[in-house]
Image: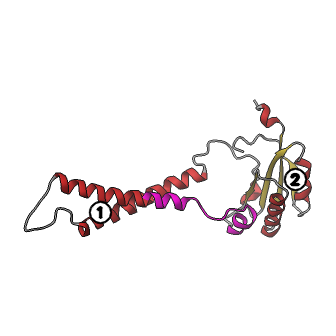
Amino acid sequence: MISPRRQDQLGVFALFEHLDSTIEACKALRKAGFRKFRAYAPLPEHHLLEEGLGHRQSPVRVFTLAGALTGAATGFAFTTWTSMDWPLITGGKPVFSIPAYVVIAFELAILFGALATVIGLFINAGLPNFRRPVGYHPECSNGSFGIRVTAPASRAAAAKEILDGFGPSELRDDNQVDSDD
């Protein structure tokens, strides 16, 4: 069942043979005010992400930093708590020996940073995705590039005209409901 809010959304799919025309079509769509579009590529292309879709930096690095700082703090807290709970005062040795704690803090920073990176990767990639891909064309795995635009019914013709201006090898209306846009 299509929700009333999604009934007025139409999809347009264009298949391109060259990366340059795909990037330029994405730029033109962004310039025209379209925000709900997806680009499909046969392999990871940083030009398509950076120039075409406007993605600059990956947010996964924030997860890594937060995980590493949490791990280092946990390492220092754990070793400090252990020294306070079971003090071994021998030969004038201080209760808190920071140089010895650095090793544990470093190891936990690496562990927590790696785990947070994996979690951040899954969150930002939207994995696991149990929905079938909407607007995907099998040729996007064989060397072609695709763009699927979701737009209100009143602007779908404008999106189709913009995409047609860049010479796609295939241009079609794609009226499947995109459940995550």
SS type, badge 1: helix
Residue 140, percent from left and from top: 74, 58
Residue drawn at x 10%, y 61% as measured from the top left: 89
Main secondary structure of the magenta stretch: helix
The first of marks 1 and 2 along the sequence is 1
- The residue type indicated by label 1 comes to Ile
- The structure residue drawn at horizontal position 87% and vertical position 56%, both measured from the top left corner, is 170
Q: CA distance from mark 1 to mark 2?
A: 56 Å
Marking on residue 159: 2
Residue that sits furthest to the top in the current view: 1
The three-letter code of the residue at mark 2 reads Ala
> Which numbered mark, 1 or 2, is in the foreground of this view?
1
Give the x, y percent position of residue 90. 8, 64
Where, by quadrant of the figure, is residue 43 drawn? bottom right
Q: Nearer the viewer, residue 23 or 95?
A: 95
Residue at the outermost left position: 91
Is residue 118 toward the left or the right of residue 112 in the image?
A: right
Quadrant of the rendered image containing residue 54: bottom right
Q: Which residues are magenta?
A: 46-67
Q: Is residue 47 magenta?
A: yes
Q: Residues within 10 Å of mark 1 (few under 14, many from 20)?
A: some
Q: Is residue 146 left or right of residue 80?
A: right
The residue where tag 1 is placed is: 104
Label placed on residue 46: none
Rendering coords of residue 2 (x, y %): 77, 32
Q: Is residue 11 left or right of residue 90?
A: right
Image location (x, y in percent) of residue 174: 83, 45
Relative side of 84 to 118, left or right: left
